[in-house]
Image (spheres, grey):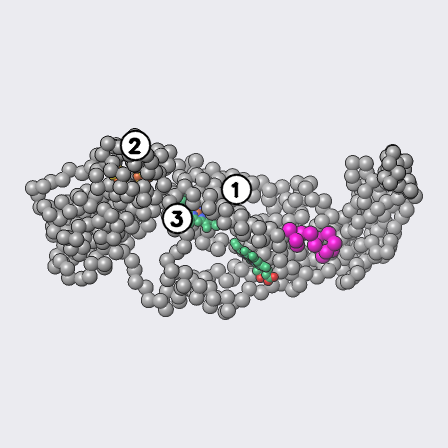
């Protein structure tokens, strides 16, 4: 999904379609949302990767002081009393964000009419078969289930969703925030730097308009509404929506629509040519075969070609008419509408008097001098008329499925790359628990209501604590930190958390209250082995080394 979104992004970027700012910005947001859905999906599996995801997310947010760093420790401990909420948020987020994506995509396409939401049916079928084959051949494997009290030393990464997390292996938390915000901003403002100027809007002469509705129906950008004007139904333009594609000029049999930059082409009733060519303004400069007498008209978009003119050319000037256009119409529907009009499927349609085989579309990939030359020499009506104008490649289904399967197979190695965030040779000590220190002051309940008065005195403040870690034997101080109780009044439990790599094999850990009852928790000779990490927790009021299931 990520790959296809990125291809769509690159496509709209290089075809400059990003000039639709709403589409672009909502596109950037939808991309971020889809990546978040993927990551929350991987959390739902609750394996070692989910645990690492939680740890890294907590690290990212604790850098901004939004999360307490102890939450990182809770993930490493797999302490479900603390991180169970994260799982619920992930489950809710995964489903809610999927629904929100639908709303974002609605905003994404609301400025354009008839958005092509679904690919052609055959493509959907071939892709489904190809994805089915890949899923059976290479099923996505989860990591081992999330374990208690160990470091997720080795996990697999799906690069398409986890690329942001990988950066946390390389950069600091602050650098990561800078990269995320910076790249999001650059992507969002890209259209302002690469903006291609839109053409001026068209002009609709309401005196000529007979209210037939065709232009409103054909406009790919929803820029024409049929409204009552001076008692009559007329085509009313919204100039701010119009991109000047001129497709509506081709829709209007009354010639009510004009564009200041394209005054129309001068017909030459007296001259005859083998072929008259209409070339889209986005089609690259091209040469024509020497043996064919050709008259070329450059048009803003193939959709702007008026059927009346084509008929006039077929009557007076040329035996054949060719259209040179892009594979993927810059203005979305110009080529399609032109083809449908020529095939007598869409009004204003080519009159039945004409043989469609006298018309031919050559897209960028199909345009070859020999083909144009051949077309000029073909006897009319030789082949079925459908094939004459329609431009599609017929691909054999088996070949299409094989190609798509090979394409999807290319991505398989990137879905489960082994990544190590923790070095198995490191000796890591993690001290992580919730601690309620002894009270240092009490206050009387001030409530006048009896039921609100507490029988026991209310704690006003609690003692701070000092955590010190020494190397056993030498008593060299390796770490010290003071923790103060949380809350406005410093009267709530605190989260003791530190994660450190040490060179010593054994350490003495001391937690001492600085005031009040001056309670002490001491654990000496804690063995710290390389590998999974050594976790110190509080169990039954005592400092202990956590084991699986403690
Ligand atoms: C969940 C992801 C996305 C979906 C499902 C989606 C879907 C669509 C659809 C259906 C259209 C209409 C195409 C047409 O009928 O011509 C469209 C247009 C567009 N999309 Fe997206 N898109 C997504 C992400 C993005 C992203 C990430 C970007 C770029 C940052 C983007 C930029 C655009 C632009 C600029 C257009 C307008 C093209 C035009 O005016 O012809 N989209 N998108
Ligand atoms: C843009 C849409 C979505 C994307 C990109 C997405 C992505 C993912 C991913 C990557 C996983 C992890 C797969 C694994 O490791 O086995 C996952 C799991 C999951 N997803 Fe989605 N998902 C989407 C929409 C949804 C929706 C709409 C629902 C439900 C209504 C859903 C329900 C679930 C559930 C229940 C799991 C856990 C499956 C398990 O435990 O094996 N997802 N999703
Ligand atoms: S196609 Fe021409 S005649 Fe018909 S509604 Fe549009 S402007 Fe009026
Ligand atoms: S020029 Fe294009 S965008 Fe403008 S009204 Fe005509 S069809 Fe719509």
338 vs 444, left or right, is left
Question: Where is mark 1, residue-wise?
Answer: 184
- Tell which circle, 3 or 2, labels the residue nearer the N-terminal end: 3
Task: Specify the quadrant of the image occupied by residue 15.
Answer: top left
- Foreground pick, 102 / 30: 102
The correct choice, above or below, for 28 with respect to 408 in the image is: above
How far across and down, in percent of the image, does residue 433 sit?
79, 51
- The span shown in magenta is 78-89
Question: Where is mark 2, residue-wise?
Answer: 231
Question: Where is mark 3, residue-wise?
Answer: 115
The local secondary structure at tag 2 comes to loop
Discs 3, 2 touching: Cβ within 8 Å: no
Mark count: 3
The local secondary structure at tag 3 comes to loop
How far across and down, in percent of the image, does residue 143 sit?
62, 63
- Tell which circle, 1 or 2, labels the residue nearer the N-terminal end: 1
User: Is residue 84 within the magenta segment?
Assistant: yes
Residue lying furthest front: 231
Residue 428, can we see it?
no
The local secondary structure at tag 1 comes to helix
Instruction: Sort mark 1 into few (<14), some (14-19) or many (20+) by Cα contacts within 10 Å.
Output: some
Q: Nearer the viewer, mark 3 or mark 1?
A: 3
In the image, is the residue at mark 3 within 8 Å of ligand 1 by its beta carbon?
yes
Q: Nearer the viewer, mark 3 or mark 2?
A: 2
CA separation, marks 1 and 2? 50 Å
């Amino acid at each position: 999904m990520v790959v296809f979104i990125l291809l769509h992004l690159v496509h709209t970027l290089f075809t400059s379609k990003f000039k639709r700012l709403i589409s672009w910005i909502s596109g950037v947001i939808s991309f971020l949302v889809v990546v978040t859905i993927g990551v929350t999906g991987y959390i739902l599996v609750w394996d070692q990767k989910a645990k690492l995801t939680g740890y890294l997310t907590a690290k990212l947010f604790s850098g901004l002081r939004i999360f307490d760093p102890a939450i990182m420790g809770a993930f490493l401990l797999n302490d479900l009393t603390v991180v169970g909420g994260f799982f619920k948020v992930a489950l809710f987020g995964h489903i809610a964000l999927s629904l929100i994506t639908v709303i974002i995509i609605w905003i994404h396409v609301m400025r354009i009419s008839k958005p092509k939401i679904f690919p052609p049916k055959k493509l959907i079928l071939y892709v489904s078969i190809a994805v089915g084959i890949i899923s059976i051949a290479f099923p996505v494997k989860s990591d081992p289930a999330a374990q208690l009290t160990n470091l997720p030393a080795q996990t697999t990464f799906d690069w398409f969703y986890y690329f942001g997390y990988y950066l946390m292996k390389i950069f600091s938390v602050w650098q990561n925030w800078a990269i995320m915000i910076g790249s999001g901003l650059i992507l969002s403002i890209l259209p302002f730097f690469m903006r291609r100027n839109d053409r001026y809007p068209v002009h609709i002469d309401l005196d000529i308009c007979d209210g037939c509705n065709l232009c409103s129906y054909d406009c790919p950008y929803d820029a024409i509404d049929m409204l009552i004007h001076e008692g009559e139904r007329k085509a009313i333009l919204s100039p701010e929506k119009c991109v000047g594609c001129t497709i509506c000029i081709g829709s209007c049999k009354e010639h009510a629509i004009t564009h200041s930059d394209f005054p129309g082409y001068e017909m030459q009733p007296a001259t005859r040519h083998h072929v008259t060519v209409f070339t889209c303004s986005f089609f690259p400069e091209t040469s024509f075969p020497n043996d064919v007498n050709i008259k070329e008209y450059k048009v803003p978009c193939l959709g702007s070609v008026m059927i009346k003119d084509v008929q006039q050319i077929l009557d007076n000037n040329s035996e054949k008419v060719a259209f040179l256009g892009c594979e993927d119409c810059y203005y979305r529907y110009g080529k399609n509408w032109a083809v449908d009009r020529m095939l007598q499927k869409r009004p204003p349609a080519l009159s039945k008097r004409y043989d469609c085989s006298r018309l031919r579309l050559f897209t960028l990939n199909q345009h070859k001098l020999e083909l144009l030359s051949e077309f000029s020499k073909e006897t009319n009506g030789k082949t079925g008329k459908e094939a004459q104008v329609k431009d599609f490649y017929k691909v054999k289904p088996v070949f299409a499925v094989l190609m798509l399967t090979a394409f999807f197979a290319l991505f398989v190695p990137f879905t489960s790359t082994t990544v190590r965030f923790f070095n198995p040779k490191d000796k890591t000590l993690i001290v992580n628990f919730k601690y309620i220190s002894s009270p240092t002051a009490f206050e009387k309940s001030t409530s006048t209501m009896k039921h609100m008065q507490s029988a026991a005195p209310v704690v006003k403040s609690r003692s701070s604590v000092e955590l010190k870690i020494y190397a056993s034997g030498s008593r060299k101080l390796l770490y010290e930190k003071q923790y103060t109780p949380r809350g406005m009044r410093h009267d709530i439990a605190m989260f003791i958390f530190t994660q450190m790599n040490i060179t010593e094999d054994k350490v003495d850990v001391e937690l001492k209250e600085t005031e009040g009852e001056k309670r002490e928790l001491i654990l000496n000779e804690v063995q710290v082995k390389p590998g999974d990490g050594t976790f110190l927790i509080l169990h039954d009021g005592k400092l202990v080394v956590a084991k699986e299931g403690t």
